[in-house]
Amino acid sequence: MIFKNEFKKEMVKKLLTPGGKGVAELSREIGVSEQTLYNWRNRFAGNNTFTVGDSPARWPSEAKAKAVLEYAGLAVNEKGEWLRKNGLKSEHLDQWGKAFISMVDTKKYKAENRVLKNTNKALEKELLRKDKALAEVSALLILKKKVEDLFSAEKDI
């Protein structure tokens, strides 16, 4: 059976809505294979589809970082509800937080940061030198034109 794109998009919406039907249930309901539903999802929702209900392993780094920051800002009594709502465990957030800290706090990044700062400083110094040279050349060019105009005016007299 051939389905129209509008129907396929509607089924993908049902898949991606939080609390919506699962792939297996929707597959049985409309009579298509689960793989077909996955293909529709990839085609109409993009390959990087992400919903809060997805497995924590599928979460993109940006969503993980946002979740860690959001969770850290909650009061103690709100954390349990937030975890249930987002389908996470506190272990996920602890693991992600440690991973982000280790990414930022390594010697490699500190050394790289130091090299970039030194390079930036050298480039700014070079830029300042070139700005001064350009100003000097511009001033000399203006003076040269004024001298030429002055001597050409004397010849006309």
Image (cartoon, rainbow, N blue to C red):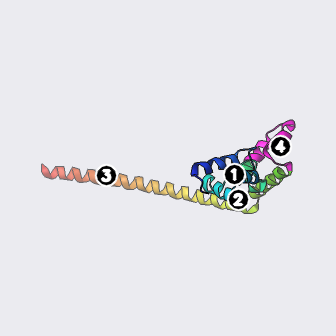
Mark nearest the camera among 1 and 3 is 1
Q: Is residue 134 left or right of residue 120?
A: left
Mark nearest the camera among 3 and 2 is 2
Distance between the Cα atoms at labels 1 and 2? 9 Å
**Bounds of the magenta segment:** 66-90
> On the image, numbered disc 3 is attached to which residue?
143
Magenta: predominant secondary structure element?
helix
Q: Residue at x 17, y 49 (%)?
A: 153
Residue situated furthest front in the rendering: 1
> On the image, numbered disc 1 is attached to which residue?
30
CB within 8 Å, label 1 to label 2? no
- Please tell me whether mark 4 sits on a helix, a strand or a loop: helix
| Image disc number at residue 33 | 2
* Residue type of the residue flagged with mark 4: Arg
Foreground of the two, 123 or 106: 106
> On the image, numbered disc 4 is attached to which residue?
84
Mark nearest the camera among 3 and 4 is 4
